[in-house]
Image (cartoon, rainbow, N blue to C red):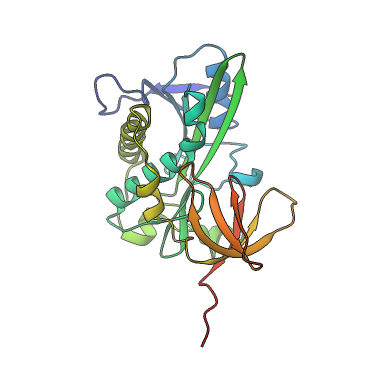
Amino acid sequence: MNQKARDLHLPLPARPVIGTSVAVYELVDSTNDLALQQLGHGAPGGLVVVADRQTAGRGRFSREWFSAPGEDVMMTAGIRPPPDLVERLSPMAGLAMALTVDEIAGVNSTLKWPNDVRVDGLKIGGVLIETKVIGDETLAVIGIGVNLVLDPSKWPEIAKTATSVFAVSGRRVERDSALAVLVRRLDELYRRLLAGDSLTAEWAERLDTIGSRVQLTPAPGGEPIEGVAVDVTDGGALVVQLDDGTKRAFNAGEVTSQNPPDRAN
């Protein structure tokens, strides 16, 4: 099913660390699965896999990912990161996507922890990062979906929660143009991580979750917890103050509701 359509040459630095190759496929099961398979077979790190259409595209918690075939961004970057940087990939990817949306749509996007990019409270893009350890090497795939022209009203599941670049800006951005910006941003930020920079402050500034009362589900089917999101750690974990005053840090999970904190009258 994974039939290679064409190589895409993007305007990137002469020696990118992400974007070493960009391949566009007409039809794949999942860009994450394909990129991980290629890395496992010895492909150089920095590859980017793009799909016109996915049959098994998924978001966090294995939810189906909705996209306009051939028009929205469905891509995965495959890398071999140092193990100590793995936990920093999620903030990096969320920040790269937010900067991309701002640039192509002319808006000021925010992030819902950990890395849903939103405009006016509606989701415009998401990230799914998966890792695999083979021997002493870590493989990581960074799956990103950005809604460029998607009409959420066609799918009841996302009709009230999603939006697109076209919907928020009236701009019809070509997918390859959006990809050029996104891969460039990923390359820039990953280079900074490799150089020892911390992106946490820049990422945290965009989090609209901080200061909100949240309900967080740590794992699919798990018992949700409630409290006020008060901070994030340098590795991107969300610090929640529970109602008994204790604080807990969550490295993974999903914020299933997010509201301004209760305030005394």
- Quick one: which residue is furthest to the bottom in this view? 265
- Name the residue at 48% across, 14% down: 43
* Quarter occupied by the N terminus: top right
In the rendered view, would you say 265 is above or below 26?
Answer: below
Q: How many marks?
A: 0
Compared across the picture, whether 250 is left or right of 18 comes to right
- Quick one: which residue is furthest to the front in this view? 245
In the rendered view, would you say 214 is above or below 174?
Answer: below
Q: Which of 146 and 141 is in front in this view?
A: 141
Residue 83 location (% of width, % of height)? 52, 25
Residue 250 location (% of width, % of height)? 60, 49
Residue 199 location (% of width, % of height)? 37, 42
In the rendered view, would you say 124 is above or below 36?
Answer: below
- Name the residue at 53% across, 72% down: 261
- Name the residue at 51% across, 49% down: 114
Residue 64 visible in the picture:
no
Residue 116 visible in the picture:
yes
Q: Nearer the viewer, residue 18 or 33?
A: 18
Compared across the picture, whether 136 is left or right of 109 comes to right
Q: Nearer the viewer, residue 238 or 259?
A: 238
Q: Which of 6 and 235 is in front in this view?
A: 235
Residue 254 location (% of width, % of height)? 60, 53
- Name the residue at 68% across, 60% down: 225
The image quadrant of residue 205 is bottom left
Compared across the picture, whether 160 is left or right of 106 comes to right
Compared across the picture, whether 179 is left or right of 49 comes to left
